[in-house]
Image (cartoon, rainbow, N blue to C red):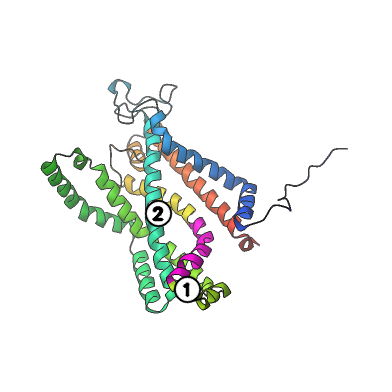
Amino acid sequence: MAVVPAPTLIPDDVPVSLWRDAWYRLKRNRLAVFGLVIVIILALTALLGPSLTPYDFLAQNLEARNQVPSLAHLFGTDDLGRDVFSRVVYGTRTAFMVAVVVTAIALVIGTTLGAIAGFFGGLFDSVIMWLTDVTMSVPNLLLVVVINASLKTPIAQWMETRYLATLNPFYRETIWIDFFLVFGSMALISWPPYARLVRAQVLSIRSRPYITAARALGLSDIIILMRYVVPNALGPLIVSVSAGLGTAMVLESAFSFLGVGVNPPTPSWGNMVSDGLRVWQHYPHLLAAPAAVLGLASVAFSFLGDGLNDALNPRGNK
């Protein structure tokens, strides 16, 4: 008689916590595990990949222009003979750096404003929610274009002036202008969802008995907010951050595709897709490689976000 294996359960003698239960539920979700594995691979690629690629992402070889994928060039070469695989790998670093920095800035702004609006209410709530509504009503692309068009030239002129005064080559690195404008403009359009989410969580938490007890003990509002309110709102916020990282990657690629994000020669999946789109009928690999990686990253973050939502909010799925 065949022996049926017993189902995997958490041992009774092991203390159960919210995070342990969430990790257990997450491991049982195959799509979430798939998304987590892809995200880890992409993160390691962003961290270590550029130092392991066989070619420099800027190295040109005009004798090897527009080659199809092969063992020598896994994703082929572009019209300047640059290795597409190396550029896609470096583009992973660009996408991850933009996504992490933008999400971190938006998270700090959104969490701070949302917590203040939800906890103190009154005028604070009215002003912050008005600012949130105004920000969300402005088209994202329009705001990014206006910021880039109005600030890029003055910043470039200032950096050129500093270079002439100091002869420091750092001021000739115009890529920092692109990153500064991308970080700032994307953070400005990304914080409102975090503010709304945190405000909703704080509104439901501030009337809990342990908040009343903390006030009875004489703790200040700031201590209560930082020690008891915000930590208890982290569950839904983690889910939102996971989805926000994927959204930030797609937005950065979209803005780079339109020419208002990270500009060449720095590799970005967006500007690589833009370049490949011009010649895709003759050299489809130039479009397929960055588009496929971007699509895989977007799907992975989507699966991971859904899995985290199921793991951290099990009652919402019943």
**The image quarter in which residue 195 lies:** bottom left
**Residue 260 counted in the magenta span:** no
User: Residue under circle 2?
Assistant: 104
Q: Residue at x 41, y 72 (%)?
A: 117
Q: Is residue 229 left or right of residue 272?
A: right
Q: Is residue 31 left or right of residue 84?
A: right
In the displayed structure, 249 sits above or below 59; it is below
Q: Which residues are magenta?
A: 222-240
* Circle 1: residue type: Leu
**How far across and down, in percent of the image, does residue 238 sit?**
50, 56
Q: Is residue 164 left or right of residue 46?
A: left
* Circle 2: residue type: Ala
**How far across and down, in percent of the image, does residue 6 sit?**
78, 45
**The image quarter in which residue 108 lies:** bottom left
Q: Residue at x 19, y 50 (%)?
A: 155
SS of the residue at dot 1? loop
Q: Could one spot residue 141 in this view of the protein?
A: yes
Q: Residue at x 64, y 50 (%)?
A: 24
Q: In the drawing, what numbered circle is on residue 219? A: 1
| Quadrant in which the N terminus is drawn | top right
